[in-house]
Amino acid sequence: MTGPVTIRFKGPAGPATLSVTEVGPNKVEYTVKSGSGRSQGGASGPGQGCITVLRSNGGGNSCGGLGDAARPSPQPDAVVIQATTGEDGTAILRIVSE
């Protein structure tokens, strides 16, 4: 992925969207909307990224170093989103659900 994009998917509380708002060398910023909830994440620097977990009763973010950025594990009744920075101005997005 090399530019802003919106991805629609089924979240635990119904329809959800992941909007990537900025992508650059070693940088990614995004917003997730699910039900009445909204979460923002962003990371910059080599090997950095964020993980957002959506549940029917809310969600949360964790950002920082992701090491080798392996695919996140599915969690019961949740959707896990991983956004990782890329050196070449791209971002890697993974959306995992059970």
Image: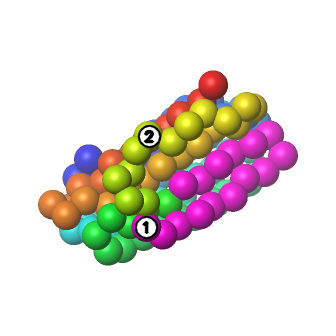
Could you tell me how many numbered marks the image carries? 2
Residue 5's spot in the image, x, y percent?
37, 48
Identify residue type, mark 2: Arg
- Please identify the residue farthest to the left as the structure is shown: 88
Q: Is 15 or 80 nearer to us in this picture?
A: 80
User: Is there any visible trace of residue 49 in the rendered image?
Assistant: yes
- Please identify the residue farthest to the bottom as the structure is shown: 45
Residue 85's spot in the image, x, y percent?
32, 61
Q: Is 4 or 24 nearer to us in this picture?
A: 24
Which mark is first along the chain, 1 or 2?
A: 1
- Please identify the residue farthest to the top as the structure is shown: 98
Identify whether 25 is placed above or below 81: below
Residue at position x 80%, y 40% from top? 56
User: Is there any visible trace of residue 4 in the rendered image?
Assistant: no
Residue 62 is covered by the magenta coloring: yes
- Tell me the residue that label 2 is attached to: 71
Residue 64 is covered by the magenta coloring: yes
* Residue stretch rendered in magenta on the structure: 51-65
Identify whether 70 is placed above or below 43: above
Q: Quick check: 14 left or right of 86? A: right
- Please identify the residue farthest to the right as the structure is shown: 57
Q: Quick check: 49 left or right of 86? A: right
- Tell me the residue that label 1 is attached to: 65
Identify whether 98 is placed above or below 69: above
Q: Quick check: 92 left or right of 88? A: right
Q: Is 88 or 64 nearer to us in this picture?
A: 64
Residue 43's spot in the image, x, y percent?
42, 70
Residue at position x 62%, y 61% from top? 61
Identify residue type, mark 1: Gly
